[in-house]
Amino acid sequence: MTVAKSTLNVKIDKSVKEKVAQLLESMGLDHTTAINMYYRQILAERQLPFQPKSALTLDEQIRAAALKRNPKRVILQTDENGSVIVDKDKHPDIYEWAVNG
């Protein structure tokens, strides 16, 4: 039984195509096989095999970058001898620093 084939023409950035070709080759695949696999997965799952997300707005990007640069701060307490009091379970990194310097 012969299955009718159809051609699919897609425009894609040349550098993306070349990089993907190298990755596919390392997996023993070519573009045609990979695209066939992708389409068959869409049919099997009746949805894309990944969840697209909208791009972040500039404000969201700035906020995310600021949060990465300003990690949550912990206020340290000391006892009467000036030793740092740290909950080992809540802040293991700070505890390690307080004990070993």
Image (cartoon, grey):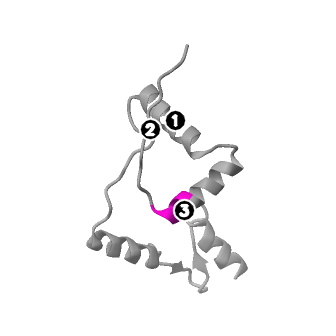
Residue visible at 68% across and 50% down in the picture: 25
Q: Residue at x 63, y 49 (%)?
A: 24
Q: Earlier in the sequence, mark 1 or mark 2?
A: 2
Query: In the figure, 53 relative to 42: above or below?
Result: below
Residue 90 numbered tag: 3
The secondary element bearing badge 2 is classed as: loop
Camera-side mark, 1 or 2: 2
Nearer mark to the viewer, of 2 and 3 = 2
Q: Position of residue 76 (x, y in %)?
A: 50, 78
Q: Which residues are magenta?
A: 13-17
Q: Nearer the viewer, residue 43 or 74?
A: 43
Q: Which residue corresponds to mark 2?
A: 7
Disc 3 secondary structure class: loop
- The local crowd at label 2, few if under 14, some if 14 to 19, many if 20 or more residues have their Cα within 10 Å, is few
- Residue located beneath label 1 in the image: 36
Q: Mark 3 or mark 2, which is nearer the start of the sequence?
A: 2
Q: Look at label 2 and name its amino acid.
A: Thr
Seen from this angle, which residue lies furthest top?
1
